[in-house]
Amino acid sequence: MDNHGDDYATFVRSRSHALLRSAYLLTGDQHLAEDLVQEALARTHRAWSRLHQSGNAEAYARRVMYHTQVSVWRRRKVAEDLPGDLPEQADRSTDDESITRRMALARALSSLSARQRAVVVLRFFEDHTEVEAADLLGVSVSTIKTQTARALDHLRKRVPELQEFRTAEGTGR
């Protein structure tokens, strides 16, 4: 029993950062991401005896995160309106340009719906196929295609530098 506890603790120490990074991309908020990872790790701990032997603990934890996030989408929400945008900064150097570009992209990503953000994370950050993303989120492949197209259109409008970015949208990859 103690060995299982040590194995679980090692798993948490080694994979928590990667899980938190994905959760942040899914939620767009550090605190919500921490809550999502905590929930995933709690459920993983409950199933540890069977996951430990199969070696699928991280896949299980990620799947729990995706499903938990989908259930959050389905709940009624009270709209949150943040006043104004951050002021544009003058270009001081290439570092400032890079920072400004990243901030603009972060604002654009945060303006996506939760579903669109999850699809973008799965497709372009975690490099899942449309079929895999659909399976992980429990939606159809056509929903993934539609949400991907809408998200990329939205991002291209919000961040003009992305106009040049093209993907293999019709290839299923």
Image (cartoon, helix red, strand yellow):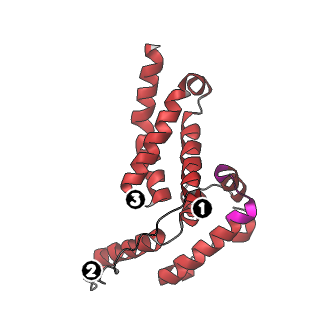
Q: Nearer the viewer, residue 163 or 45?
A: 45
Relative to 48, is 24 above or below? below
Q: Residues within 10 Å of mark 2 (few under 14, many from 20)?
A: few
Give the residue type that dot 1 points to: Val
SS majority, magenta: helix
In the rendered structure, the answer to whether residue 2 lies left or right of residue 96 reads right
Mark 1 secondary-structure assignment: helix
First along the sequence among labels 1 and 2: 2
Residue 131 numbered mark, or none: none
In the rendered structure, the answer to whether residue 173 lies left or right of residue 58 reads right
User: Toward which corner of the image does residue 110 lie, by quadrant?
Assistant: bottom left
Which residue is disc 3 drawn over?
29
For the point 31% across and 79% down, which residue is it? Answer: 86
Cα–Cα span, label 3 and label 2: 29 Å
First along the sequence among labels 1 and 3: 3
Residue 119 numbered mark, or none: 1
Start and end of the magenta stretch? 136-144
Q: Position of residue 78 (x, y in %)?
A: 46, 66
